[in-house]
């Protein structure tokens, strides 16, 4: 679900996703450049991936810290993992972008 559609569709109001801070690195580029289009991971996906995989939090704890449901964290982590795998195995650059999310630092 793209959050940039806020206000244009019916349904409930989307909640803000709390991000603890901006990442120190905004891009990872493979050494032998392949020239392929980079994979973009938004801040919410990067934060969910950091909390669950890097800091080894449970989905419940990560959801509480981000202010969203456990299902939302699960969806964000799965999307980020899929994009990371695509970048690694296809030799693409990884960019961390704002991506239209409604983050609060």
Image (cartoon, rainbow, N blue to C red):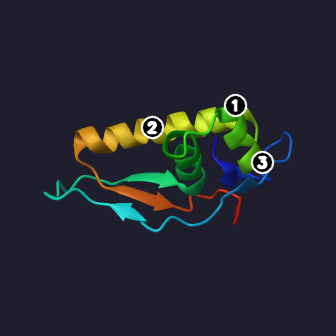
Mark pair 2, 3: CA separation: 21 Å
Instruction: Left or right? Give the position of 24 relative to 75.
Output: left
- Residue 23 in the image: state x and y as whole percent: 51, 64
Q: Which residue is mark 2?
A: 81
Label 1 crowd (10 A; few <14 / some 14-19 / many >=20): few
Does residue 21 lie above or below 92 as drawn? below
- SS under mark 3: loop
Q: Nearer the viewer, residue 73 or 95?
A: 73
Label 3 crowd (10 A; few <14 / some 14-19 / many >=20): some
- Residue 89's tag is none
**Dot 1 and dot 3 residues touching (CB under 8 Å):** no
Label 2 crowd (10 A; few <14 / some 14-19 / many >=20): some
The quarter in which the N terminus is drawn is top right
Mark pair 2, 1: CA separation: 15 Å
Q: Determine the residue positioned at 30% across, 55% down.
A: 93
2 or 3: tag closer to the N-terminus: 3
- SS under mark 1: helix
- Residue 73 in the image: state x and y as whole percent: 65, 38
2 or 1: tag closer to the N-terminus: 1
Q: Which residue is mark 1?
A: 71
- SS under mark 2: helix
- Residue 100 in the image: state x and y as whole percent: 62, 58
Q: Which residue is mark 3?
A: 67
């Amino acid at each position: 679900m793209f959050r940039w559609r806020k206000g244009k569709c019916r349904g409930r109001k989307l909640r803000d996703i709390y991000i603890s801070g901006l990442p120190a690195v905004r891009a990872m580029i493979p050494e032998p450049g392949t020239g392929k289009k980079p994979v973009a991971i938004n801040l919410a996906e990067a934060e969910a991936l950091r909390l669950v995989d890097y800091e080894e939090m449970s989905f419940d704890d990560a959801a509480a810290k981000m202010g969203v449901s456990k299902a939302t964290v699960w969806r964000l982590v799965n999307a980020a993992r899929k994009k990371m795998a695509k970048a690694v195995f296809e030799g693409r650059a990884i960019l961390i972008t704002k991506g239209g999310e409604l983050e609060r630092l």
